[in-house]
Amino acid sequence: MASTVKYVRVPPPSANIAEARKRVFEFFKTACRSIPTIMEIYTLDDVVTPTKLRSTITSEFRKNAHVTNPQVIDMLLIKGTEELSNIVEHAKQRHHIIGQYVLSREDSNQETKDEGTSDFLKSFYKGNYV
Amino acid sequence: MASVSATCIGFGTSFELSVRARSQRIGKSWSLVSWGRSSGFRTSGLQICAAKPETLEKVNGIVRKQLALSPETELTPQTKFTELGADSLDTVEIVMGLEEEFDISVEEENSENITTIQEAADLIDKLVDKKA
């Protein structure tokens, strides 16, 4: 079932933050270079432009800009690589991509299921320690 | 350029030296003139400027859009990306945007050196020429 490499070896951990930084930029470039493929696989031509996808990728990277520990950066890179390979090998579907990467956060707001419920119920669903 | 060569000729002291200096200076002035011709709008002939104006225009447009600059911000070829408020991630993103726009592939060691708009345009032209 796995069309990619079966035994993906985890690369050795970055020695310092400079090497982690280099890996981050490498991954960023890989992600940006696979944008045309992604647009083609999921036929996103009428929904989003490559420029907008690139800025979405940038903002995802910026969310973790405060991290300084090289091991944490490595872990985030592994997760990111996994996500990217899932997308590229068509393991996701169009609505996943659109919902996660095309729609802005204000648009989706993830409230479509609970419209009209009270605030109490919303906090109740979320958890005990609101 | 001609005035520079004239003053250099004036410096030669002995007759043989001045003849040699004259011929050398003339040689240098010729090469300077040819540099000036090929670079077009560059007046300082020593700077080898290979970027075409339309490449620079496109680069400017992409940088403006990427960094969301106001129309008043002046973009000279020497402007560094960091001056415009771009951090390293922004710089890489701009390079990727240029890669997509011009359909080129910037290698690892080249991308580290791009700090100004001029360098980006030069690199683009070099890669486009190599591809063609």
Image (cartoon, grey):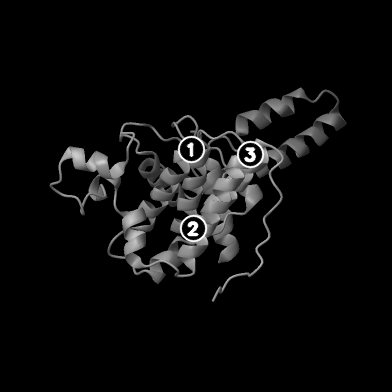
**Measuring 38% from the left and 57% from the top, which residue is drawn there?**
A50
Image marks 3 and 1: residues in contact by CB distance under 8 Å: no
Q: Is mark 1 on a helix, strand or loop?
A: loop
Q: Nearer the viewer, residue B35 or A46?
A: A46
Labels 1 and 2 share a subunit:
no
Instruction: Identify the amino acid type marked 1.
Output: Pro
Q: Judge from the rendering whether residue A36 lies leftward or rightward of residue B38; answer left or right.
A: left
Q: Is mark 3 on a helix, strand or loop?
A: helix
Tell me where residue A93 appears, x and y as whole percent: 37, 67
Instruction: Identify the amino acid type marked 3.
Output: Pro
User: Can you say whether A50 is above or below B39 in the image?
Assistant: below
- Residue A15's label in the rendered image is none
* Chain containing mark 1: B
Give the CA distance from mark 1 to mark 2.
38 Å
Crowding near pointer 2: few (<14 within 10 Å), some, many (20+)? few
In this view of the protein, can residue A98 be seen by the observer? Answer: yes
Q: Judge from the rendering whether residue B65 lies leftward or rightward of residue B18; answer left or right.
A: left
Q: Which residue in the rendered view is the most extreme toward the bottom?
A: A1
- Residue A70's label in the rendered image is 3
* Chain containing mark 2: A
Give the CA distance from mark 3 to mark 1.
36 Å
Q: In which quarter of the image is residue A128?
A: top left
Reading the image, the residue beneath label 1 is B77
Instruction: Identify the amino acid type marked 2.
Output: Glu
Q: Which of A45 and B98 is in front in this view?
A: A45
Q: Judge from the rendering whether residue A115 lies leftward or rightward of residue B57; answer left or right.
A: left
Q: Which of marks 3 and 1 is in front?
A: 3
Q: Which residue in the rendered view is the most extreme toward the front?
A: A128
Reading the image, the residue beneath label 2 is A83
* Chain containing mark 3: A
